[in-house]
Image (cartoon, rainbow, N blue to C red):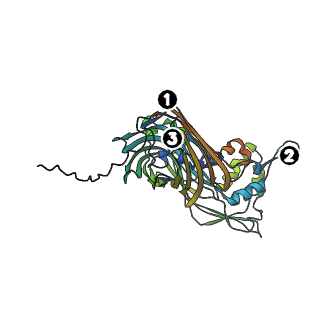
Amino acid sequence: MSYMRMSDRIFPVITLLIIMSPVLLFAQHDLTLYNMGQVPQRIYLNPAFIPEQQAYVGLPFLSGIHGSIAYPFTYNNVLTRGADDSLNFEAQNFLDKVSKSSHVLFLTGFDILSVGSKIAKGRFYINFGIRERINENLYLPENLFYLLWYGNTASQIWGKSVNIAPSMNATVYDEWSFTFAGHAVKNKLTYGATVKYLSGRMNVTTKKSEFDFYTNPNTYDLQMKSDLDVQTSGINDISSYMDQGTSSLIFPANSGFAMDLGVNYQINDHFSVNASVLDLGFINWHSRTLEFVSHEPGKEFTYNGMSLHDFAGLFTDFSKYGTKILDSLKKLVHIDSVYGNNYRSNLPAQFNIGGTWSPNEKNHINLLLNGISWDHHFYPALSVSYFYNWTRHVGLTVSYNMFNRQFTNVGAGISLSTGPLQFYVVSDNVPGLIAYRTSNNTSVQFGINILVHGRQTKAPPPEAEPTLQPATEEPKTQ
């Protein structure tokens, strides 16, 4: 373990966060896919959802690709077109939206390999998968935007002590999973569990994020104090990341474990209930770690401005204007860089509780409550969907979804099979794909599978109970 005062290495990290922030506007709840009965990949959302097919193989890198975008505002909220056809930024509208929701999520990934099969005449099911996953949670405090846009005299922060520190929790990792599922209670209950080995690639974990900012209304001095603790792995000197050996790239020295649990209970021929909890786990970070901590947490320092000579010097070379400003602040903001500290980060846990009413084998109406627990916050979602099992080769679904403070999300999905190939595509908000200027979220997910249907596509029937037969009288002999 080694220490050094804050150096220029911290600024590439800050720059990275700023550059990534427009990309981090994602949230993935997988609401519509959860009840698409013909798609094998929904076993990742509930390990008790045994696929209808006898077996399947996901086409490598193409069996499960998904991405979505969600943010507190819409395009039309913050950008308007003037009479001269110019675009205008509506700052106050932007600030109003951010003040209501400052958290942004990103949960996405793609399947590298996915394969599953029924065994023991259909009584059990096993599944193996390798997935690349990215989880990110970004918090952007509204007070920071008031300061950046209106300056320190903004009425919202003038004469007040406000926290302007953003925070970020992000993880890039590989997931190696094995699922075992089976039937019980005379096949009315299906259960499943997934164990996962996690191989971490990059991480940013914010343990403390406090930077109090106060403008003295009498002297106009800026009084600040910080208590920051940000742990990272793999982002220090990103340019050399690909220079590592092949073994280090495939299996980084950051290991973790996680588990998924799920159940599905068939109450009668028409009603069933289900539940799952996903990603209960952690990753231990050992490789290429770098931690940023306040040198003197809670100590107050004052910025009185700069001398006229120093101010004039800012304009001698405009190419270094920003660097000179940052250098002057570096003398006040005492942040230490600590190398070699090991630490642990937790995955965002997901929860699902659902129910299905099936008037017949083709029609299914579903209710799903979903939530993501992450960084001491809970992000809920609600979905009502209809799945039409047209044939064994065609499935259609539509859904109404509420999440991200938007209540106009209409989702849809389709799965098509021809021969052994299956193609599926699904979105939690189809209008958001079309009318993106009035929507604050958009999502799409698709994949290609190779299916083996077999003769038996349903759970094995329960064993018949033995019945007593009336004894027959033996004929009497004369």
Kind of element beneath mark 2: loop
Q: Answer whether labels 2 and 1 touch (C-beta < 8 Å).
A: no
Q: Answer whether labels 1 and 3 touch (C-beta < 8 Å).
A: no
Q: Give me the C-alpha separation between circle 1 and circle 3.
A: 14 Å
User: Which residue is label 1 attached to?
Assistant: 419
Q: Going by the picture, which residue comes out furthest to the bottom?
A: 218
Viewer-proximal residue, 382 or 14? 382
Please state which amino acid type lies under the numbered disc 3. Answer: Gln
Q: Residue at x 27, y 54 (%)?
A: 468
Viewer-proximal residue, 438 or 250? 438
Kind of element beneath mark 1: loop
Q: Going by the picture, which residue comes out furthest to the right?
A: 83
Q: Nearer the viewer, mark 3 or mark 2?
A: 3
Q: Residue at x 86, y 46 (%)?
A: 82
Q: Residue at x 46, y 44 (%)?
A: 175
User: Which residue is label 2 attached to?
Assistant: 82
Q: Going by the picture, which residue comes out furthest to the left?
A: 478
Q: Residues within 10 Å of mark 2 (few under 14, many from 20)?
A: few
User: Which residue is label 3 attached to?
Assistant: 38
Q: Earlier in the sequence, mark 1 or mark 3?
A: 3
Q: Going by the picture, which residue comes out furthest to the top?
A: 419
Q: Position of residue 237 (x, y in %)?
A: 55, 43
Q: Residues within 10 Å of mark 3 (few under 14, many from 20)?
A: many
Q: Earlier in the sequence, mark 3 or mark 2?
A: 3
Tell me: residue 78, above or below residue 39: below
Q: Earlier in the sequence, mark 2 or mark 1?
A: 2
Tell me: residue 473, above or below residue 60: below
Please state which amino acid type lies under the numbered disc 1. Answer: Gly
Please state which amino acid type lies under the numbered disc 2. Answer: Gly
